[in-house]
Amino acid sequence: MGTSYANIFFGQSCGQKTMAASNSSDGTGTVPLLLGVTDNGKENNTRASQVGRWWNKVLDMEEAKHQLLFSLPMILTNLFYYLITLVSVMLVGHLGELQLAGATLANSWFSVTGVAVMVGLSGALETLCGQGFGAKEYQMLGIYLQASCIISLIFSVIISIIWFYTEPILVLLHQSHDIARTAALYMKFLVPGLFAYSMMQNMLRFLQTQSVVMPLVVLSALPMLLHIGIAYALVQWSSLSFKGAPIAASVSLWISMLLLGLYVMYAKKFKHTWQGFSMHSFHHVFTNLKLALPSAAMVCLEYWVFEVMVFLAGLMPDSQITTSLIAICANTEFIAYMITYGLSAAASTRVSNELGAGNPEQAKKAMNVTLKLSLLLGVIFVLALGFGHNIWIQLFSDSSKIKEEFASITPLLAISILIDAVQGVLSGVARGCGWQHLAAYVNLATFYLIGLPISCLLGFKTNLQYKGLWIGLICGMFCQAVTLFFFIRRAKWTKLELSGDKNKDQPLVV
């Protein structure tokens, strides 16, 4: 779901001031409430001060405020980019059932083979750029960005070749020939968008690790709004019709990428971290790849398990109902994870920046705050789902059978959302520390050696059916969260050796 982040820059120096404040903090709390000057107010002010100190023991409010200010723009940014491809599918749905089925399947294929891989590959920058920024090796951030873009470009070519064989692959996976053919046509016109998406993800990580997140809301909302007009015009008003939807998505993704690229190259605040294109970036491709590959594996292994769950649901009796229920649960989990993702980004950035600056204790304190915030927001989401599940399910289906069954699986869904709130933050910490390889092994073991076997056993050998599938997933998620938590607590938190080039220029201190 995952697949995957601090203080916020409002200007060139604001982020550095915030970081300096964080680094110098002893982590014990914020400044006490102002004390009164009269004898009559001393008792009330003392009590207020004690309450303030008690709250700070529970949650560092200053750190929590910074992380929330970081997380909200990241949540909105990812939502806007997600809506670009979703709007295209929604418009195609008005052309007919076959077009909707083909576009939906294509969008799922795009997510599984494109989005998951590219988001995972860009995760290397959360370590490299995050710790490099904390260590004040500012000129290296642009080098790492270019190296990551080279890797993403290579993988985009490989994935594009796979996409040209979409139809036979989908038929091999027992999909309808007509739907597979329609999905393959859709994918063909999404190929240009894949290249833009891969570059865009790298630039997002480059900006995120410098805590530049507020401008991303505007830079993502603008192409999303433009996309609505472009997609509607191409689908409804032009002869392209069905083809217009993926073409519009590709155009809008390129607009998004170009906007981010122009911002990185010409904004004055990046004059130290972006110093133009350099052939030196090729020397760091292998360094980046050592983190990018396990990072991609880490994201894909977690992301694909939900697709496997939907596939398993389709093998059950009354597959139309079970597939719909598991798909609805997976989509609900994804929406809940969008909140966790913002906090995961905050955890990754804060941890990597502090480790780069040589402050492991501050990094641990930041992680503790993020975990508490994520759990709190997870509880709020679960309560809203618990009281409003009847309203929520109506957005997906009018079937009384599906509504009844969804009500019975809601408690299990609530448990998985709360576990996801914890593991999402822990995965962000792992990326910030450069432990992607460990997280990849953990995801492989917990989801595929523990979770899925339990899902198959309970789903097909007991009367639990689709509930058994989700219980198995919960077991895998729980083992994943516990394993990551245990390792992160026991591991030695140190700055990763970012470069083997001992003759590189001295870090530039701003």
Image: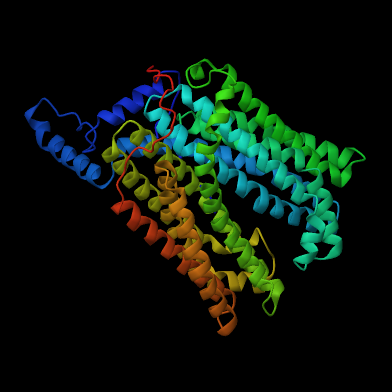
320 displayed left or right of 439: right
Q: Is residue 460 left or right of residue 272?
A: right
Q: Residue furthest right?
A: 239
Residue 97 in picture, x, y percent from top left: 83, 59
Name the spot of residue 282 as percent of width and height, x first: 58, 30
| Number of marks in the rendered image | 0
Which residue does the image show at 53% across and 25% down from the upper left?
142
Would you identify the image quadrant in which residue 192 lies? top right
Location of the C terminus (image quadrant): top left
Q: Quadrant of residue 204?
A: top right
Taking 117 as reference, is 227 left or right? right
- Give the camera-side residue of 391 and 333: 333
Q: Position of residue 356 (x, y in %)?
A: 36, 33
Residue appearing at x 38%, y 29% in the figure: 134
In percent of width and height, residue 70 lies at: 44, 35
Toward the bottom, the furthest residue is 462
Q: Nearer the viewer, residue 459 or 510?
A: 510
Q: Residue at x 56, y 27 (%)?
A: 281
Q: Nearer the viewer, residue 51 or 373?
A: 373
Relative placement, left or right, of 32 versus 358 is left
Residue 144 against residue 348 in the figure, above or below:
above
Residue 380 visible (yes or no) = no
